[in-house]
Image: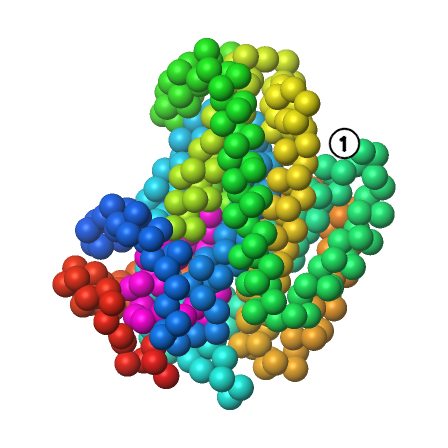
Amino acid sequence: MEQIQSFISAFSSFLWGWPMIILLLGTHIFLTIRLRFPQFKIFTAIKLSITKDKESSGDISQFGALMTALAATIGIGNIVGVATAVSLGGPGAVFWCWITGVLGIATKYSEGLLAIKYRQKTKDGTMIGGPMYALEKGLGMKWLAVLFCIFTIIASFGIGNGVQAKAISESLYQSYGWSNYLTGSVLVVLVSLVIFFGVKGIAKVCSRFVPVMAVLYFIGCILILILNWNFLGQAIVLILKSAFSPQAAGAGFLGGTVMMAARYGISRGLFSNESGLGSAPIIAAAAQTRNPVRQALVSSTGTFWDTVVLCALTGLVIVSSIIAHPDINQNSASILTQLAFAKLPYVGTLILNFSIITFAFSTILGWNYYGEKSIEYLGGKKAIIYYRLAWVVFVFIGSIINLTLIWDLSDSMNALMAIPNLISILMLSGVVVKETKKYLWDNKLDEFDPDCKQ
């Protein structure tokens, strides 16, 4: 097992070297410039995300699709992922994580647009789409679409299942002494009850679940930052300096290289918001929308809420808390956020435990859908039942096995998923620009695309 873990860790480090960082950030920057900074349309996008449009075609509402995508993205990456980035890359990792989110809005926009543009209706009348269909229908590269699905399925058991289940079991064990085996058993039952409802059931649960859990976590972070007010300015300065100067780390932090800060900040940022990963477009394809651009805008808000807001808050909470209480950083990365929240009297630990459990559980639901659609692309609907059975079994396994191995495996699969997805986005960027000009730049967001009315 140690040899396997060492190999996967080395493989993950190789994948997340400078080439991947350049490819990912380069795509974000390229699309940001070519699409005329779609980040400035974020408030229009937020308004669209909460606007009902019963005349549009699709399986679920735009809000339902967004909440399901957020359910999959707002997870342990926002809590443990950011803490791991700070522990391994220093406080500068928070900056790179945030930058990945800001620039990633353009990439998430492009993914959402292509998901609608190349989606298709199945024999039973449901919508299906995602990077695999953009690769096949838009570029004629079915072999790469197959690879994307294979990587997605493997990644789903890591980023969307094992990591989340382990986080829940560790949280309950650390706080209440619950056995990992007991937690795993309970999770198997709860997950099984939800995933057999299908996408509409998952979307319905997430639409009610996600806003409550996100707001509660947001309030908890704000309360801690109020407690750490005297150290907040110092934390911001340290984050910015450490992002570019390895000598800037201090106040209880271990100094790292700029490469380490960038590597862990960007990888954890991708793990958290999934911009460029290609997962969120799979659910975006099922959304009710008038044209591809409307859904593209709605999809882009997922990255804004997940990373630009929640991950940034988490990073500030951790860094300011370590400055205020340097002894916190003597502990493992997995409990840094827990120790920071514990400084909030009476309710801090309760808020964090609730957030970890709900974030992780919702991620398990969202990623189950991504995996199912990848399985359906490869083997048809009949293969889904076997995937679901394997899914609930791995929920239990993830609750009891080593977390480091799962993190490294997840990082590796994230990179392998991102490569074909980024290829499709870059090669089809002309299509994205054409649709954006037609509906956004020419102020025709309310018009119907004939293909969306099928």
Report whether 151 appears left or right of 357: left
User: Which of these two is toward me, 159 or 120?
Assistant: 120
Q: Is residue 341 visible?
A: yes
Disc 1 crowd, CA 10 A, few/some/many (<14, 14-19, 20+): few
- Please state which amino acid type lies under the numbered disc 1: Ser
Q: Quarter of the image holding residue 139?
A: bottom left
**Does the segment drawn in magenta span residue 345?**
no
- Image location of residue 254, percent across then percent down: 54, 19
Q: Is residue 41 above or below residue 256?
A: below
Q: Quadrant of the C terminus?
A: bottom left
Q: Which residues, given as a range, are shown in magenta?
A: 273-300
- Image location of residue 443, percent across then percent down: 17, 62
Q: Is residue 415 above or below residue 235?
A: below
Q: Residue furthest bottom?
A: 123
Q: Residue beneath label 1, please?
A: 175
Q: State the residue at coordinates (19%, 51%).
A: 36
SS at circle 1: helix
Q: Is residue 118 visible?
A: no
Report whether 173 appears left or right of 283: right
User: Which of these two is toward me, 148 or 210?
Assistant: 210
Report whether 226 appears left or right of 428: right
Q: Is residue 449 above or below residue 101?
A: below
- Image location of residue 208, percent across then percent down: 56, 54
Q: State the residue at coordinates (73%, 51%).
A: 398
Q: State the residue at coordinates (83%, 39%).
A: 178
* Colouring rule applied to residues: rainbow
Q: Residue furthest left?
A: 442
User: Which of these two is toward me, 48 or 149?
Assistant: 48
Number of residue marks: 1
Q: Quarter of the image holding residue 422?
A: bottom left
- Image location of residue 190, percent across then percent down: 74, 57
Q: State the residue at coordinates (64%, 27%).
A: 348
